[in-house]
Image (spheres, rainbow, N blue to C red):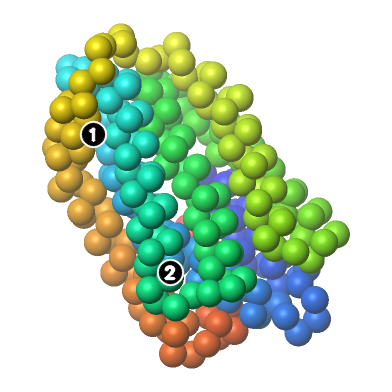
């Protein structure tokens, strides 16, 4: 996690400014800081706070399929709500694209979280650690190479999304298959029951993140995107701590 978040800070709080064209560093940093802030709110909805419950389910009340299907539902809802919120607030053009692409990139945390829960229950935290470390380094390398070569953040973020998802499909999913609980017949009611049971956790995590994010979003609306970029450069290292 330290490697992963350190690499993210280097992308969103350092290299975005260093590699941007002269005079555009603060503005680009502001766009990316805003995208990260908006994304964090809906990322908590996607993860649903379920990991704590999942690794505590020692009686195996719910199957692996229940956890995976519940994550499909929450991730889909998070994508739709994030896009709807961004349009209603008034983000448009390049800023809307950056929010959308960065949201897809960060959603991989929620997607892999359910698979990492299987690993944790079997005391294989090494798989989780390797996954985060490699994804962090991959993202950093792709960002530096592509953004330096093209100056196109849409292309850069798109490449980060494709590469990290491809890595997780070949590493996280493959390495956790042997930890799945016995497959049970599909029961949609059990998935919704699981979501209902974890709702208090989901509400807590969502509110906890939202209360920290709303002031930043208001700041960006009132002070401008460049000011948000300067604030993000100072604030981002807190993620590592």
Q: Nearer the viewer, mark 1 or mark 2?
A: 2
Judge whether residue 235 can be spotted in this image.
Answer: no
**Which residue is denoted by mark 1 in the rendering?**
53
How far across and down, in percent of the image, does residue 53 sit? 23, 34
Q: How many marks?
A: 2
- In the displayed structure, would residue 2 be above or below residue 156? above
Q: State left or right for residue 15 relative to residue 196.
A: right
Work out which residue is located at the far bottom of the displayed protein and give it.
Answer: 223
Query: Which residue lies at the image location 37% right of the left edge and 67% below the top edge?
Result: 85
Residue 86: assigned label: 2
Mark 1 or mark 2: name the one nearer the start of the chain. Answer: 1
How far across and down, in percent of the image, does residue 18 sit? 76, 71
How far across and down, in percent of the image, does residue 104 sit? 52, 50
Query: Which residue lies at the image location 53% right of the left edge and 19% below the top edge?
Result: 175
Q: State left or right for residue 212 relative to residue 7.
A: left
Query: Which residue lies at the image location 69% right of the left edge and 48% below the top edge?
Result: 159
Disc 1 on helix, strand or loop? helix
Dividing the picture into quadrants, the one containing residue 89 is bottom left
Disc 2 on helix, strand or loop? helix
Q: State left or right for residue 210 relative to residue 102.
A: left
In front: 81, or 15? 81
């Amino acid at each position: 996690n330290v490697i992963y978040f350190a690499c993210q800070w280097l992308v969103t709080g350092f290299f975005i400014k260093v590699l941007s064209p002269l005079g555009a560093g603060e503005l680009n940093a502001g766009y990316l800081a805003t995208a990260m802030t908006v994304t964090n709110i809906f990322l908590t909805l996607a993860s649903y706070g379920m990991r704590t419950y999942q690794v505590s389910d020692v009686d195996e009340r719910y199957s692996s399929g229940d956890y995976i299907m519940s994550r499909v539902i929450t991730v889909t809802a998070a994508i739709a709500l994030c896009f709807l919120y961004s349009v209603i607030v008034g983000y448009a053009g390049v800023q809307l694209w950056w929010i959308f692409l960065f949201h897809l990139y960060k959603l991989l945390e929620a997607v892999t979280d359910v698979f990492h829960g299987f690993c944790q229950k079997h005391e294989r935290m090494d798989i989780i650690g390797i996954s985060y470390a490699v994804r962090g380094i991959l993202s950093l390398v792709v960002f530096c190479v592509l953004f330096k070569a093209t100056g196109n953040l849409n292309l850069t973020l798109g490449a980060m999304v494709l590469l990290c998802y491809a890595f997780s499909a070949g590493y996280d999913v493959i390495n956790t298959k042997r930890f799945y609980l016995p497959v049970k017949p599909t029961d949609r009611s059990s998935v919704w029951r699981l979501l209902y049971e974890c709702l208090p956790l989901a509400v807590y995590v969502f509110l906890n993140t939202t209360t920290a994010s709303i002031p930043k979003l208001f700041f960006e609306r009132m002070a401008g995107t460049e000011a948000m970029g300067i604030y993000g450069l100072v604030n981002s290292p807190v993620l590592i701590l």
